[in-house]
Amino acid sequence: MARTVLVVDDSTFMRNRIKEALEGDELTVAGEAKDGDEAIALYRELRPDLVTMDVTMRNTDGFTAAEVILKEFPDANLVLLTLRQEAEKHFLEEAAKKMGIKAVILKPFKPEELKASILGILKD
């Protein structure tokens, strides 16, 4: 049975790119959100196995949405996607790790690497 993913990004292009990278026998995209508020509501409704979350979005950003989700659902699997530079990734990873976020992945990403990372998290 395929594991479910909620894709959260304010860019329709990026949501489609993430969906294309993930959809297959092992993963299915259960829902999409364009901001943190929608992500929180959809997580409560769908309870996906994993969430990919953009960091920078209008309304509620990815860190704030992740904090709300993890407070209610401490076992949630969250992965942050960001356009930040490699040098900033370390600081994001430190903050994310303290919050309980599983990984920080830089955009642009290679589709096969994104899928492999997510499958690895779901196997742990």
Image: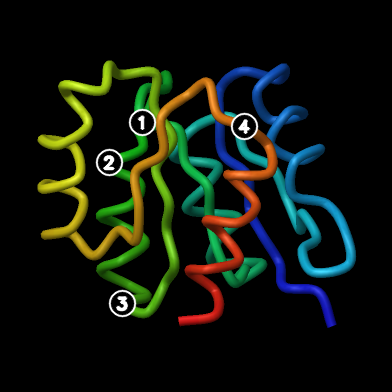
Kindly state the secondary structure of the residue where label 2 is placed. helix
Tell me the tag on residue 68.
Answer: none
Indicate whether 24 appears above or below 64: below
The kind of residue on which mark 1 rests is: Val
Residue at point 75% right, 41% down? 21
Which disc is residue 74 wearing?
3
**In which quadrant of the rendered view does residue 9 lie?**
top right
Q: Quickly name the residue at label 2.
A: 63
Say which residue appears at 11% left-offset and 48% top-offset.
94
Q: In the rendered structure, which disc, 1 or 4, sits on the residue that comes first in sequence? A: 1
Front residue of this view, candidates 119 and 73:
119
**The disc label shown at residue 110, or none:** 4
Q: CA distance from mark 1 to mark 4?
A: 18 Å
3D distance between C-alphas at marks 2 and 1: 6 Å
Distance (Cα) linking label 4 and label 2: 23 Å
Circle number at residue 55: 1
* Pointers 3 and 4 in contact (C-beta within 8 Å): no
Question: Mark 3: which amino acid?
Answer: Pro
Against 24, residue 77 (above or below) is below
The reply to whether callout 2 and callout 1 are in contact (CB within 8 Å) is yes
> Pointer 1: residues within 10 angstroms few (<14), some, or many (20+)?
many
The kind of residue tagged 4 is Lys
Q: Could you tell me how far apart the alpha carbons at marks 2 and 3 are, in whole angstroms?
A: 15 Å
Question: Which comes before the other along the chain, label 4 or label 2?
Answer: 2
Task: Give percent across and percent down for residue 80.
Answer: 39, 43
Q: Work out which quarter of the rendered image holds the N terminus and state it.
A: bottom right
Check contact, mark 2 vs mark 3: CB within 8 A.
no
